[in-house]
Amino acid sequence: MRRVSIFGATGSIGQNTIDLIARAPEEYSVVALTGGANIEQLAQDARRLNAQVAVTAYDDKLDALRAALEGSGVEAAAGRTALIEAATRPADWVMSAIVGSAGLEPGLRALQQGAALALANKESMVCAGPLMLETAKTHGGRILPVDSEHSAVFQALIGEDMAAVERVVITASGGAFRDWPLEALANATPAEAATHPNWDMGQRITIDSASMFNKALELIETREFFEIEPSQIEAVVHPESLIHALVGFRDGALMAHVGPPDMRHAIGFALHWPERRDLPVARLDLAALGQLNFRKACETRWPALRLSRSVMETRGLAGAVFNAAKERALDGFLDGRIGFTQMAEVVEEVLSQLSSGDGLTPATLTLDTVMRADHLARERADAIMARRAAN
């Protein structure tokens, strides 16, 4: 039996992973499930899969988790230390689906155990791509992309020579505001930004889709994961969200990955890799679709894409700074301190302030230097938003 752990089990990626594992319980031994405040769901899944341990990120939820698991034989734990301890438990395959920079250290610890890391936490590669890849190489681990775009690129490159790759095209839905007039964006509300035209996701990721900060992170992740030049990476708006990515080769050919917008495809590919197995996803009726549309990803409408170019060129700790500033700017938008279009302005100012003089571009990335950059960027973002509010 394969030993598996799921970090971020109560989120959408975690729940889709559990759906696939629960369809073949005889094949898997579940080591650890981790989640946040949704104790009922975490306990229910831990019981269902007979996990060794269930961990909530919140210390004050431990008693509730213990009560929910009473009599199940599943160990209950809480807090950051427990999360890291769970990541060090031997497992063959680990899903990394914790949102934000909080997912970096558990992913690194899993790689240090030689696990195959199914990476849905794009921030890990954005903040510390070279460190992630080197850790996997040193300890015999493997990183398998689970973002649908990077899974698509990964699949299109199977059997191909990277030297023949001319470009990688990452598609974007365009989010809630893809058809809004530019002048209306400044007054967009969190509720409007959190309404996706194609699917139902969590609030934060849906707003990141509207601002294209999620796509900016994916462009940076493409650069780090596949180690290609920024000039070779493109973004294009594809409203139907059926083509997840394309790889262009030097002979002019484009290899496209086409499939329904169902995360179980990318998760299942990583779970069963290097095999392909049957998956419970819809099969596309191309005649019924009729047509697929594409449009330019305008950097005036979505300045996050422009900022990602700068981060890809700078590398070092620029990714950690970018991600942390983005997270704090989103907090500021949600609590009314700044407007929708001001999020990119805050991130750009943080990047400018920390681009020199703070030792933020070390020759070697470490977990400590990444977390220091993360902390500094959050402080600067808060100070910038406080100054703007005062004015």
Image (cartoon, grey):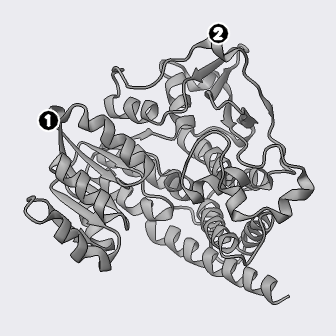
The residue beneath circle 1 is 1
Tell me residue 106's x, y (percent): 35, 60
Residue 271 or residue 197, whichever sits in front? 197
Is residue 87 visible in the rendered image? The answer is no
Secondary structure of the residue carrying tag 1 is loop
Q: Quadrant of residue 275?
A: top left
Q: Is residue 354 shown above or below 274?
A: below
**Is residue 222 left or right of 82 when viewed as pictured?**
right
Residue extending farthest to the right is 183
Q: Residue visible at 62% across and 53% down?
A: 206
The residue beneath circle 2 is 287
How far is the residue under mark 2 from the one under mark 1?
A: 42 Å
**Is residue 242 left or right of 232 when viewed as pictured?**
left
Tell me residue 224's x, y (percent): 57, 46
Secondary structure of the residue carrying tag 2 is helix
Residues packed near mark 1 inside 10 Å, few (<14), some (14 to 19) or many (20 plus): few
Q: Is residue 235 shown above or below 89?
A: above
User: Which mark lies nearer to you, 2 or 1?
Assistant: 2
Closer to the chain start, of discs 2 and 1, is 1
Q: Residue visible at 24% across and 73% down?
A: 64
Name the kind of residue labelled 1 in the image.
Met
Where's the C terminus, which quadrant?
Answer: bottom right
Where's the N terminus, which quadrant?
Answer: top left
Name the kind of residue labelled 2 in the image.
Ala
Tell me residue 91's x, y (percent): 22, 47
Q: Residue visible at 34% across and 20% down?
A: 278
Residues packed near mark 2 inside 10 Å, few (<14), some (14 to 19) or many (20 plus): few
Q: Residue visible at 64% across and 25% down?
A: 247
Task: Confirm or deny contact between disc 2 and disc 1 (CB under 8 A).
Answer: no
